[in-house]
Image (tube, rainbow, N blue to C red):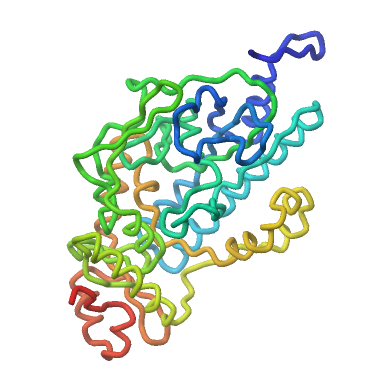
């Protein structure tokens, strides 16, 4: 039931007050979910995990800087990687701080509330969490069920006119809020162009088969995941050379494409060790956390994990995310992004740490001239 309040002579709902509060801070969309509307989902939609008294979840979306995304996809040197990287981190932090301020507003009204950190927090008590990476709460599923956006072919949440180039924020509360409905299928941003699948260097998404999830009576379909380790390898920056060798991510790794699950697990193990031997380079930024550690509300919200998460923020290095960044919710713009990506060339790293972006054939020729010891850091035959 919607909670009604009287303020300045007007009758307004708490839902509307929260929505306006978040929109005024920059949210594109705001949605509300409850235990009932999330019923039937996986453990990652159990909102009581973050707050035992939780009755409702509030989800919202913020835009990423599209100009910086284009520079990132194009692999502009020297700042194309760093500029988007810092914007991405800043937008995630903004989402969390907005969730904290909304929680404080609700607490002042007598409700319990807790902000959900949008990344880096996993259910570490679950077996195999290191590979499965079970989130504290699945913001994606909550966003889909509450109508913040719809699930695209890649499994990312998107909004018409923005696509999937967004960051989600969330908080949970003891307030009984009125749930909002999912985006109708006919109003989805996703046209099934599947360029997101082609933009993944290791093809984590199936191009034909789907999987689904049902939440509170609504079923959501998206591409079947082949193996999450494919994402961990390429989005983790351990390798970047596309399946056919025609382009790369920002990673200098050039390991051969893994055809099977067995091969990708073997590659993951090898690539982690190899990447630790790479020299430092200048393409990445380092987010300045000095102001964050002085933010009392932020530190209190992070609790016992504050040191761990601040360290992760400082060490974040983005080299991919193409499946999310490629889609702008407008077919022509998405196609343009894809063309930028596949014509962006390949990254190689010299012995002194210098990064170069060269056309695919030239990159291969230059790489082959490197000393064998240096090449083995970036390309190994793990298929034996």
Q: Is residue 195 left or right of residue 288?
A: left
Q: Residue at x 31, y 58 (%)?
A: 230
Q: Residue at x 24, y 50 (%)?
A: 198
Residue 24 position within the rendered picture, expressed as x and y whole percent measured from the top left: 66, 31
Name the spot of residue 331 as percent of width and height, x first: 29, 35
Residue 87 seen anywhere in this rendered image of the structure: no
Check the image and report above or below for 368 versus 5.
Answer: below
Q: Nearer the viewer, residue 280 or 146?
A: 146
**Horizontal placement of 295 versus 125: left or right?**
right
Identify which residue, 206 or 374, lies in the foreground.
206
In this rendering, would 244 be left or right of 123?
A: left
Q: Is residue 49 above or below residue 93?
A: above
Instruction: Identify the image quadrant of the N terminus.
Output: top right
Q: How many marks?
A: 0
Report x, y in % for residue 308. 63, 63
The residue at 63%/27% (across/down) is: 55
Q: Quadrant of residue 59?
A: top right
Q: Quadrant of the C terminus?
A: bottom left
Residue name at image x 72 percent, y 53 percent: 303
Front residue (pair 189, 58): 58
| Above or below, 349 relative to 300 | below
Q: Position of residue 281 (x, y in %)?
A: 46, 77
209 left or right of 108? left
Q: Is residue 291 visible?
A: yes
**In this rendering, is residue 256 above or below 321?**
below
Q: Nearer the viewer, residue 24 or 70?
A: 24
């Amino acid at each position: 039931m919607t909670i009604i309040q009287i303020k300045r002579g007007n009758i307004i709902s708490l839902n509307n007050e929260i929505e306006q509060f978040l929109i005024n801070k920059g949210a594109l969309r705001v949605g509300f979910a409850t235990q009932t509307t999330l019923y039937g989902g996986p453990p990652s939609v159990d909102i009581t995990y973050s707050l035992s008294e939780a009755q409702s979840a509030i989800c919202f979306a913020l835009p990423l800087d599209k100009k910086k995304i284009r520079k990132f996809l194009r692999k502009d040197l020297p700042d194309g990687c760093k500029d988007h990287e810092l914007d991405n981190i800043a937008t995630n932090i903004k989402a969390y701080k907005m969730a904290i301020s909304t929680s404080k507003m609700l607490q002042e009204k007598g409700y319990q509330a807790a902000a959900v950190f949008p990344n880096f927090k996993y259910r570490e008590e679950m077996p195999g969490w290191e590979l499965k990476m079970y989130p504290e709460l699945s913001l994606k599923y909550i966003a889909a069920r509450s109508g913040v956006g719809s699930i695209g072919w890649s499994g990312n949440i998107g909004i018409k006119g923005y696509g999937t180039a967004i960051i989600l924020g969330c908080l949970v509360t003891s307030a009984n809020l009125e749930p909002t409905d999912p985006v109708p299928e006919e109003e989805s941003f996703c046209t099934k162009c599947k360029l997101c699948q082609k933009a993944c260097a290791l093809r984590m998404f199936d191009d034909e088969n789907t999987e689904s999830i049902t939440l509170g009576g609504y079923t959501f379909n998206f591409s079947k995941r082949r193996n999450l380790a494919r994402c961990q390898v390429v989005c983790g920056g351990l390798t970047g050379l596309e399946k056919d060798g025609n382009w790369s991510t920002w990673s200098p790794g050039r390991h051969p494409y893994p055809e099977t699950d067995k091969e990708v697990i073997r590659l993951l193990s090898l690539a982690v060790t190899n990447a630790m031997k790479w020299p430092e380079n200048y393409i990445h930024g380092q987010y300045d956390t000095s102001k964050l550690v002085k933010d009392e509300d932020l530190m209190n919200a992070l609790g016992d994990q504050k040191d761990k998460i601040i360290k992760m923020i400082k060490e974040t290095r983005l080299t991919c995310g193409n499946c999310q960044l490629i889609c702008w919710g407008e077919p022509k713009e998405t196609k343009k992004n894809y063309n930028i990506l596949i014509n962006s060339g390949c990254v190689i790293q010299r012995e002194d740490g210098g990064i170069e972006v060269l056309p695919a054939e030239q990159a291969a020729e230059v790489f082959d001239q490197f000393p064998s010891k240096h090449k083995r850091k970036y390309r190994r035959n793990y298929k034996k």
